[in-house]
């Protein structure tokens, strides 16, 4: 017989609205005497309802989220004692609850196993009815069973945690990332600086490494960092997050717009985290994100190892027993967030990556094409439409070239017009200093073709100043040990090519081989 059917409650339940008020006031620290006075109920009645909530380990957030009908069913009186047949079936329910999370297991299959052992037991329809009633009683907020290893539900809490700058006392609000595996409800929580793409992806990745595996799908709640355009049928996933999911060989399934049941499991997790993480931290002061995450991790471990109400197992034990082995293995190393840029393949078979002011080679047949650059901390990839043209280790040396020899157009018309021999012969016609200077430019690079534009620029200066001045400017530049177009242009512009040796010593020229102006390479 139900606890609330006894005569001490006059065989009548109080209004379910008052039930919610009882627990809300009690959770706020109001005494039973004051609750009794405010609601016009006896202290004995107040005590019995509070004891019931405690027995089921219900939190204030869980109770407030339940409908009046769910509360009514939870407290519903059952005047008839349970039959031996039903008591026998109920002993199997915790086992069924675990088994249904495994791939391929259905209620029909479990009933067949049960009925084989108990031929005088319930038929399939009654079997399903009593199991549904049991799940409603032990899990009044969440009735769905997710398959192990299938989905990871992702969201952020509405409320924020705060850290204090140790030196200035300035407060910084932190976002709190929450995710939960659908089957075991094993939960991961961390604080981060923002919900921006980089922080979001790092939090999701930290969760995967916390779980030690990858689910079949990630289910974000239409977060801007994950979904660029929400839709009931075909939401558009952020390009970087899609690439992240591809790297981990999982799918992205954003929750459907206007479908609250899609995200009920993570929203329930958020409500519980408010009680089991936010509340215990409210009187503590933290000065950094790593510091507060250490405190969160300790509380999270307690939460995950706490038994479900009405069950003898926890999120952690269910994860270890049922879900962990269903997750796909992690890759050998973590994902690197990628960014995107556009460019054009130059006539020398290179693209200019403006972020690092560096040049990367591309096969010469793509000269003139508009390309897409996808780059991370360690890699630069170059695409034309969907074809990857080249991939290079990322280099950050300004105005330098990274070249794959096979990319250069050895038999292309470009080579027949511009070659090292042609530039050297041209320079020799101007003078021996000019010839030596052109050779120095050609010798600087991995591949001569990288320097053709510099050579062409130097030799074309004869049209402006004549052979004599250019020859003398090259002599000066050889003395300085600087081999590029810009230093020749500077010497000529300032008339240093015509100075005598005594005056030359007063010229303020930096003495190193890497003088070049950025505007020349753009």
Image: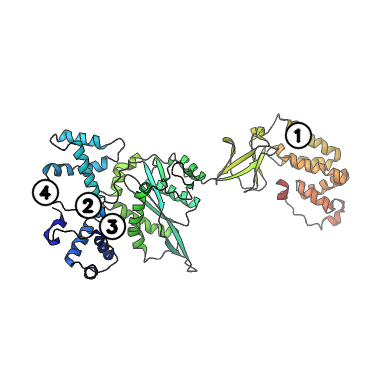
Task: Report the coloring of the rendering.
Answer: rainbow
Question: What's the distance in space between the residues labelled 2 and 4, CA to CA?
Answer: 17 Å
| Mark nearer the N terminus (4 vs 3) | 3
Q: Residue at x 47, y 40 (%)?
A: 246
The picture places residue 218, in percent across and down from the top left corner, at: 41, 44
Between disc 1 and disc 2, the foreground one is 2
| Mark nearer the N terminus (1 vs 3) | 3
Q: Which residue is mark 3?
A: 63
Numbered mark located on residue 73 in the image: 2
Numbered mark located on residue 81 in the image: 4
Q: Which residue is mark 1?
A: 419
From the viewer's perspective, is residue 50 above or below residue 431?
Answer: below
From the viewer's perspective, is residue 248 above or below residue 192?
Answer: above
Between disc 2 and disc 3, the foreground one is 2
Question: What's the distance in space between the residues labelled 1 and 4, CA to CA?
Answer: 99 Å
Between disc 1 and disc 3, the foreground one is 3
- Secondary structure state at the residue bearing disc 4: loop
Question: What's the distance in space between the residues labelled 1 and 2, CA to CA?
Answer: 88 Å
| Mark nearer the N terminus (2 vs 4) | 2
Q: Residue at x 84, y 53 (%)?
A: 496
Find out whether the residues at labels 1 and 3 contact each other: C-beta distance under 8 Å: no
Q: Residues within 10 Å of mark 4 (few under 14, many from 20)?
A: few
The picture places residue 36, in percent across and down from the top left corner, at: 21, 68
- Secondary structure state at the residue bearing disc 3: helix
| Mark nearer the N terminus (1 vs 2) | 2
The picture places residue 405, in percent across and down from the top left corner, at: 65, 34
Question: What's the distance in space between the residues labelled 2 and 3, CA to CA?
Answer: 13 Å
Find out whether the residues at labels 2 and 4 contact each other: C-beta distance under 8 Å: no
């Amino acid at each position: 017989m139900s606890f609330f059917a006894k005569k001490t409650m006059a065989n009548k339940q109080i209004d379910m609205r008052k039930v919610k008020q009882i627990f809300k006031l009690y959770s706020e620290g109001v005494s039973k005497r004051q609750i009794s006075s405010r609601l016009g109920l006896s202290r004995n009645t107040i005590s019995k309802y509070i004891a019931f909530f405690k027995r089921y380990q219900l939190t204030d957030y869980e109770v407030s989220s339940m409908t009046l009908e769910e509360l009514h069913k939870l407290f519903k009186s059952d005047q008839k004692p349970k039959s031996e047949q039903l008591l026998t079936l109920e002993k199997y329910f915790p086992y069924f609850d675990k088994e249904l999370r495994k791939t391929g297991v259905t209620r029909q299959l479990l009933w067949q196993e049960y009925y084989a052992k108990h031929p005088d037991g319930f038929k399939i329809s009654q079997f399903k009815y009593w199991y549904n009633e049991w799940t409603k009683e032990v899990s009044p907020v969440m009735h769905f069973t997710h398959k192990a290893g299938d989905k990871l539900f992702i969201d952020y809490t509405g409320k924020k945690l705060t850290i204090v700058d140790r030196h200035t006392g300035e407060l910084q609000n932190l976002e709190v990332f929450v995710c939960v595996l659908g089957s075991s409800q094993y939960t991961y929580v961390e604080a981060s600086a923002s919900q921006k793409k980089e922080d979001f992806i790092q939090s999701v990745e930290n969760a995967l490494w916390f779980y030690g595996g990858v689910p079949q799908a990630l289910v974000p709640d239409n977060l801007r960092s994950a979904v660029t355009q929400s839709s009931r049928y075909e939401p558009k996933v952020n390009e970087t997050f899609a690439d992240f999911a591809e790297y981990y060989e999982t799918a992205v399934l954003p929750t459907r717009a206007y479908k609250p049941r899609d995200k009920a499991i993570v929203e329930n997790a958020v409500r519980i985290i408010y009680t089991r993480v936010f509340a215990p931290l409210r009187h503590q002061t933290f000065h950094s994100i790593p510091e507060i995450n250490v405190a969160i991790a300790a509380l999270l471990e307690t939460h995950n190892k706490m038994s479900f109400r009405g069950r003898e197992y926890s999120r952690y034990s269910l994860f270890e027993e049922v879900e962990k082995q269903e997750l796909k293995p992690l890759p050998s190393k973590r994902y690197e967030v990628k960014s995107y840029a556009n460019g054009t393949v130059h006539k020398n078979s290179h693209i200019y990556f403006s972020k690092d002011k560096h040049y990367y080679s591309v096969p010469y047949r793509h000269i003139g094409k508009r390309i897409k650059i996808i780059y991370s901390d360690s890699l630069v990839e170059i695409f034309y439409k969907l074809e990857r043209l080249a991939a290079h280790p990322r280099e950050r040396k300004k105005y330098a070239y990274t070249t794959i020899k096979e990319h250069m157009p050895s038999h292309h018309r470009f080579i027949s017009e511009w070659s090292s021999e042609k530039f050297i012969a041209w320079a020799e016609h101007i003078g021996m200093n000019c010839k030596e200077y052109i050779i120095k430019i050609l010798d600087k690079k991995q591949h001569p073709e990288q320097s053709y534009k510099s050579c062409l620029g130097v030799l074309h200066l004869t049209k402006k100043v004549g052979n004599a001045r250019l020859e003398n400017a090259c002599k000066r530049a050889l003395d300085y040990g600087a081999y590029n177009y810009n230093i020749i242009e500077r010497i000529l512009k300032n008339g240093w090519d015509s100075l005598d040796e005594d005056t030359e010593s007063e010229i303020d020229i930096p003495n190193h081989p890497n003088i070049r102006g950025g505007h020349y390479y753009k």
